[in-house]
Image (cartoon, rainbow, N blue to C red):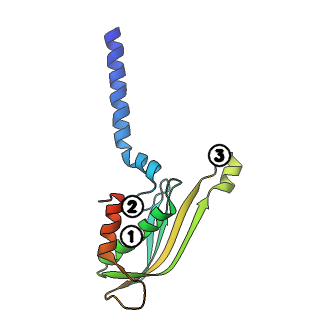
């Protein structure tokens, strides 16, 4: 009987360990904030709309653990990624909107906690050459810098 009880406890611990390992990225997002991935209903993420061959609108929505700085950085990382995919080594931000979104109306109706999360929207123009007199980002440099900062692959 005692041996059976020990085996059950070990099996339960193994099962819990497997669940925690499988949920590693979700657990990481709850601690550090939304990572670099396409948008999902549950965890946020990035999305984009191509407005022209060299202009794109990027939206990044974080979760309640995501700082404003991280949200802006991930939106910039997405801009770098898209710029390079399109064959443009540079980009400029034409317009940016950052805001904190919340579920306050929904929370009041359902008696749940109010959650605040960052939302970044930016319009980006890709460039073949680096002009002078304006703020322009080097996509390769920025991408490697931000990936290093956050440990993204």
Q: Secondary structure at mark 3?
A: loop
List x then y, in percent, for residue 139: 33, 76
Residue 53 visible, this angle: no
Residue at horizontal 49 percent and vertical 75 percent from the top: 122
Mark 1 vs mark 3: which is more N-terminal? Answer: 1
| Residue located 69% across and 56% down the image | 105
Separation of residues labelled 1 and 3 (CA atoms): 33 Å
Q: Is residue 70 left or right of residue 127?
A: right
SS label for mark 1: helix
> Which residue corresponds to mark 3?
112
Residue at (71% x, 50% y) in the render: 109
- Compared to residue 136, the image places residue 148 above or below, namely above
Residue at left 51%, top 72%?
121
The reply to whether dot 3 and dot 2 touch (C-beta < 8 Å) is no
Pointer 1: residues within 10 angstroms few (<14), some, or many (20+)? many
Which residue has dot 1 on it? Answer: 78
Query: Gap between marks 3 and 2, in whole Å?
Result: 28 Å
Quadrant of the image containing the C terminus: bottom left
Rendered location of residue 73, percent (x, y): 43, 67
Q: Residue furthest bottom?
A: 132
Determine if residue 7 is in view: yes
Going from the N terminus, do you reach mark 2 or mark 1 first? 2
Please state the horizontal and vertical placement of residue 20, each as a whole percent of the image.
38, 39
For the residues marked 2 and 1, what is the alpha-carbon distance in whole angstroms?
Answer: 8 Å
Residue 109 or residue 145, whichever sits in front: 145
- Kindly identify which residue carries mark 2: 36
Q: Nearer the viewer, residue 28 or 3?
A: 28
User: Tag 2 or tag 3, which sits nearer the N-term?
Assistant: 2
Q: Is residue 59 above or below residue 62?
A: below
Label 2: element kind: loop
């Amino acid at each position: 009987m005692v041996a059976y009880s020990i085996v059950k406890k070990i099996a339960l611990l193994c099962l819990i360990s497997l669940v925690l390992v499988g949920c590693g990225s979700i657990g990481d997002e709850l601690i550090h904030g939304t990572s670099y991935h396409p948008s999902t209903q549950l965890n946020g993420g990035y999305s984009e709309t191509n407005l022209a061959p060299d202009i794109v609108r990027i939206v990044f929505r974080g979760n309640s653990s995501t700082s404003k700085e991280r949200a802006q950085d991930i939106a910039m990382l997405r801009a770098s990624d898209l710029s390079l995919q399109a064959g443009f080594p540079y980009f400029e931000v034409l317009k940016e909107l950052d805001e904190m979104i919340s579920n306050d109306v929904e929370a009041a109706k359902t008696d749940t906690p109010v959650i605040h999360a960052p939302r970044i929207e930016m319009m980006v123009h890709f460039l073949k050459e680096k002009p002078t007199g304006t703020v322009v980002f080097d996509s390769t440099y920025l991408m490697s810098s931000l990936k290093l900062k956050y440990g993204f692959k």
